Amino acid sequence: MTTAQYAAVPANAAHDILSGSSDDEGSCADHEVLREEEEREKLLAGRNGLFGSIGGKPGVKIGRKVRGVRGKKKGVRDVVQMMGGKRLGMEEGGEFGLGADSDDGANSEEGGEVDLLREKEVFDRKPRKPSVSRVLLYTVSLLTLLLLLISASLSLSHGHRPRTAPLGITKDTRFSNGTHDYMPTTLLISLDGFRADFLDRAMSPELTAMASSGLSPRWLTPAFPSVTFPNHWTIVTGLYPESHGIVGNSFWDPALEKEFFYTDPARSLQGEWWGGEPLWATAERQGVKSAVHMWPGSEANDGWGISYLDHFNSTESLKRKTARILEWLDLPLQDRPQFIAAYVPNVDVTGHKFGPNTTALNLVIREVDAMLTDLLDGLNARNLTDLINIIVVSDHGMASTSHERLIYIDEIIDMSLIEHTDGWPLYGLRPHANVNITALYETLLSETLMNQAKGKKHWDVYLRDENMPPRWHFSNNNRIAPLWVVPETGYAIVTREEYDVDAPSKGRYEPAGLHGYDNLHPLMRAIFVAKGPAFRHIYGKGIEGAVDVGVVVEEFGNWEVHRIVCESLGIGEALGGTNATIKDLAAFKAVNGWPVAEGEEEGEVGTSTIAQVGETIAPTLTATVPTGAGEGVVSIQTIPADPNPQPNPNTTQLPEPNQNEPQNHPVESPEEGEEKKSDEKNPEDMNPWEYAKWKAEKLRIALEKWWEGVWVGDD
């Protein structure tokens, strides 16, 4: 009798069955029902059941044996408990029509006529082993179900989005948004002056959401010097400033006998200044159309052959920028650009004018974030969210300055000995030909050492060809001045003629925010946030497959961006190569233990600079990085304070900077357990055949556990 048949028995008949008040034939049928129910429940949900064993953990015993107690009569409640109670649908007042206190048969004399010895014999009987046909039936059913699941998983994993996006993409790959075809397309958006920790101010929810659901390093390291033109040109060429020649916002070229000054287009937009091959030239050379909106350097060299070029316009609104990008994406396939670069200066302009820790800057951050919201909404409306790569970068950070943090260089050396000065707030000095540069250096150095003895050292001095820090990559070009004074972050070098703090007639000191300092200083850190098909194999999907789960990778330098963009487009990199050291997107490794958990110290969580960069970090703390990917003990840099902090509820006071010269950091071997962990394959990294074999192996293990459970008798 099946469960359904048993449930259909009238209430009085059920009462007779349960109380044992039937004839011998009925009693045998009762015990047969109990035995069948016991075996069925054991298979469905018991310790050795079909589904209970798959997880590898014992299930709850449903069809357990119940031994009769001699001399005690069984009531309805006793039998219900013996048969599994509520697990068999026997809720109070349920389908059997039994109330909470319905024990009418409990004291029945007829019920006492049940042969207790026979009852004991039946209840003690061991369950029969399932027949071969039943085992085969369940095996075939299970295999069919799991094969269907594997097929569904493969179709979802490999049909909707590429699993190894950059490896399989070429510039001619076609995607469809449902109505139109799209070639691989990447948007590169620069938010000038957007410091890395601005993301922590809760003023940019859209950008923060991108970072938390896409790929981003803890920060992007700018090139030295950390000023606008050198860094924007490094981003698009993949070259250090010493390699591409834009070594500052202003500098003197002794070979050309000309001065480059970024605010003078007549001088700065000549092609002779701009070395390297920018991304738009790399793309156009390979037949990939480009569109550039106001990117520094894009107007030089007669436009570099860019298909669509927008000239700089300082008054253009953020909404117009968004509309312009979407206009390009709406062009017909044959006219549509695949690489789009756009420049947004608003954060930098406001940071200079009011300082980085002000309400004015927070307001602009909100406005820029709203622009990104409009852009992403536009992509979503066109069903392009999963087809278009979008990369948001910045060129450098920003530090507060004030009239109390000025270094008057004309009080240290005779400025009449200097023919040209380059850069700001750091100073490159080019003495006249007859001036002893070594004597100038020693004068500046002695002043530095004297101030250091007083605890007031606020700058360092370097000779380009002798002791310039190698990690800056700032010596192998004659456009770099031979003598440099590099101030401490937040300080600026001036002359009394430019600004005299004792002469109010000179007006209010400006700017309130500056950059251009040591590129490894935390206040100079920039951002890199990427989403799209070229990166999703790294950050991937969540458990439900509906929400992207972001990943934080090791920080890297902005000279890596050129190669990253080229790979996302499926094109080769620049002619002549770049200074990039990350081989490809597959080289990115997630950072464990980031961000720092609440209550932990900064030094307790591993941080490191990407190993391929070949640069060093000032060693002040040591931490273990358990990433299982080759990282060991590395030296890290503490986070110095903003040199001129201003009250702001959205910022945190940080410890003082360490001014020691950076040293090489030791790298130790990972622990044995970490090596083993790194060898484990991630399903997201498998091709379809590997993924199917991985699923089959899991199926084999599950079947072995189930088969063992089928043949093991109950205790």
Image (cartoon, helix red, strand yellow):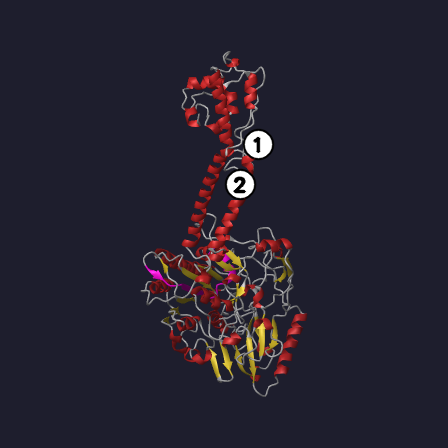
Looking at the rendered image, the quarter that the N terminus falls into is: top left
Q: Which residue is mark 1?
A: 713
- Residue 412: give x, y in percent of width and height: 61, 78
**Secondary element at tag 1:** loop
Mark before the other along the chain sequence, 2 or 1:
2
Label number found at residue 55: 2
**Secondary element at tag 2:** loop
User: Does residue 182 belong to the magenta stretch?
Assistant: yes
Of all residues, the one furthest to the top in this rendering is 109
Name the residue nearer the viewer: 339 or 370.
339
Question: Who's the residue at 61% across and 70% down the image?
Answer: 458
Q: What stretch of residues is rendered in magenta?
A: 180-203
Label number found at residue 294: none
Q: Establish if 259 lies above or below 215.
A: below
Q: Establish if 82 lies above or below 625.
A: above
**Taking the image as drawn, is residue 356 in sight?**
no
Name the residue nearer the viewer: 574 or 560.
574
- The amino acid type, in three-letter code, at marker 2 is Gly
| In this picture, residue 113 sits left or right of residue 619 | left
Q: Circle 2: is it few (<14), some (14-19), or many (20+) Cα within 10 Å?
A: few
- Residue 536: give x, y in percent of width and height: 46, 57
Of all residues, the one furthest to the bottom in this rendering is 434
Task: Say which quarter of the image contains residue 628.
Answer: bottom right
Q: How far is mark 2 from mark 1, CA to CA?
A: 19 Å
